[in-house]
Image (cartoon, rainbow, N blue to C red):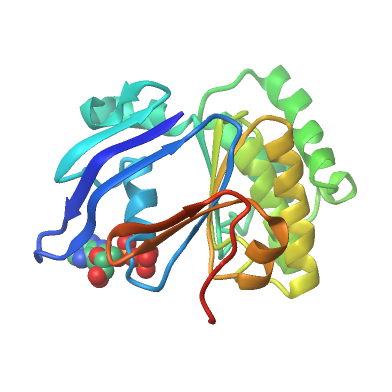
């Protein structure tokens, strides 16, 4: 589903963020992206989201070379990708239901589909009871569940999670990981950038380690491999 072919990214300040990266991620995989700060993880994700373009190389997503997508087609491309962040990024003045529904409204889904789908994903993340509540009335773990529901509501084939447990206590973080695992088992490909050693070591998923812009390790049932 994702193929990086000899991908390099050099920023305007001549920093080589990624150098000749070759990576293939198959449909349905669960992949942890690890590595020290400044290694190139965010650049890898930004390339996938088409927020930046590679300096050289090709990036195929579902067999399509995304470096050739035209600017006006980018919003349509991004709809196929769900995104979850460390800081949740919910809309503060919308309740739980509306935060999730909003993601469907922006893609102009039919109202009857929104009425059907939003309760379904809220139930998937265990928040059916809290649909009328506003983000500030929720715990961090609950807010991350809402953001997961929002990421999944348009049924993306790929979910990218950027340090999704970074603001959560260990127990809540594990709840979110179990949800991600369920979502993955139901067929969604997951790419998760993280510094959470305990989680990576416990989950026993594929680990791609990026160091100084290159793939330093790529292991099935891998470990975090750093001490921080
Ligand atoms: P990570 O996510 O692993 O911390 P990044 O992909 O953010 O790493 O950064 C990789 C390298 O590219 C770092 O040296 C960083 O300073 C540099 N970098 C990232 N974004 C930019 C940018 N927009 N302009 C210039 N340099 C950047």
Question: In the current view of this chain or complex, which residue is farthest to the bottom?
Answer: 228
Residue 177 visible, this angle: yes
Percent across and percent down for residue 70 are 22, 26
Residue 167 visible, this angle: no
Percent across and percent down for residue 84 are 56, 52
Q: Left or right: 120 with respect to 214?
A: right
Q: Left or right: 226 with respect to 202?
A: left
Judging depth in this view, the residue of 151 and 214 nearest the camera is 214
Look at the picture and state if 200 lies above or below 2.
Answer: below
Identified at 68% across, 71% down, the residue is 198
Identified at 30% across, 58% down, the residue is 214
Look at the picture and state if 135 lies above or below 111.
Answer: below
Q: Left or right: 100 with respect to 192?
A: right
Quadrant hosting residue 4: top left
Quarter, ligand 1: bottom left
Look at the picture and state if 216 lies above or below 7.
Answer: below
């Amino acid at each position: 589903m994702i193929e990086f072919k000899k991908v390099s990214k050099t920023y305007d300040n001549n920093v080589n963020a990624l150098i000749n990266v070759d990576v293939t991620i198959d449909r349905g995989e669960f992949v942890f992206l690890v590595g020290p700060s400044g290694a190139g993880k965010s650049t890898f994700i930004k390339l996938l989201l088409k927020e930046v373009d590679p300096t050289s190389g090709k990036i195929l997503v579902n067999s399509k070379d995304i470096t050739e997508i035209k600017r006006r087609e980018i919003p349509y491309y991004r709809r196929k990708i769900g995104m979850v962040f460390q800081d949740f990024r919910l809309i503060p003045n919308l309740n739980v239901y509306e935060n999730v529904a909003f993601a469907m409204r922006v893609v102009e889904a039919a109202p009857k589909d929104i009425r059907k789908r939003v309760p379904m994903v809220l139930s998937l993340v265990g928040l059916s009871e809290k649909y009328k509540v506003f983000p500030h009335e929720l715990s961090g773990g609950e807010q991350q569940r809402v953001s997961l529901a929002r990421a999944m509501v348009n049924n993306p084939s790929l979910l990218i999670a950027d340090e999704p447990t970074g603001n959560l206590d260990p127990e809540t973080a594990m709840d979110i990981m179990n949800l991600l695992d369920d979502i993955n088992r139901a067929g969604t490909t997951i790419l998760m950038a993280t510094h959470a050693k305990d989680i990576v070591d416990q989950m026993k998923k594929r680990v791609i380690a990026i160091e100084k812009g290159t793939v330093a390790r790529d292991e099935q049932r891998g470990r975090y491999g750093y001490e921080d």
